[in-house]
Image (cartoon, helix red, strand yellow):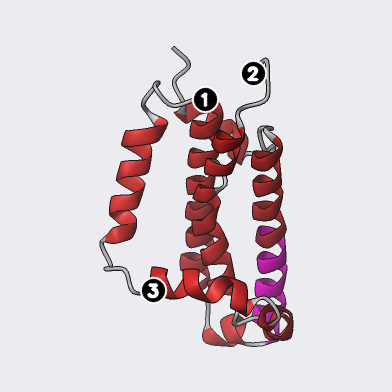
Amino acid sequence: MTKKPKWWWRTLACLPYLMPLHETWMYAEPAYNLHPFLEDFEFLTYPFLGSIGRLPGWFLMFYFFVAYLGVVRRKEWPHFFRFHVVLGMLLEIALQVVGTVSRWLPLSMYWGKIGMHFWTAVAFGYLFTVLECIRCALAGMYADVPFMCDAAYIQIPYD
């Protein structure tokens, strides 16, 4: 990239991070230590979380197919935007994998003191990672998330 993308591409590149932010918020609520912290920001997120909750169950699968086939794999879109779309999708998939695997653990570890500390760490780590990706998108930069950015570059055709 030789110059900074236009402001509308930078703003549009932030939209794919709303889904991992929503997923992080949903996993952060069970972490008892975060509940008072999250209540301060509830008025900002409640309309988005409520609208996502009202969507049909097949919508997320549809969203991933349209985003991947309609945006990431098409060369008409700028590389910067395609990178942030696929990175947002990868962040959400990784958090869903962690959530699915953690449900296989005994409930004493999932809801107990160990689970509380685990979900607090995961929630803070993901929250700050997603916010850093949003900051990089607004600044017109590529986010450098270890392992994820390499996977994102692999998905995007250059030619």
Q: Are marks 2 and 1 in contact (CB under 8 Å)?
A: yes
Q: Which residue is located at x 68 percent, y 78 percent?
A: 38
Residue 9 percent across, percent down from the top left: 55, 34
Q: Which mark is residue 53?
A: 3
| Prevailing SS of the magenta stretch | helix
Which image quadrant: the C terminus?
top left
Residue 103 is at least partly visible in this image: no
SS at circle 3: helix
Q: Is residue 61 left or right of residue 53?
A: left
Q: Closest to the observer: 113 or 106?
A: 113
Cα distance, mark 1 to mark 3? 31 Å
Which image quadrant: the N terminus?
top right
SS at circle 2: loop
Residue 72 is at least partly visible in this image: yes
Magenta segment: 113-126
SS at circle 1: helix
Residue designated by label 1:
79
Q: Which mark is residue 1?
A: 2
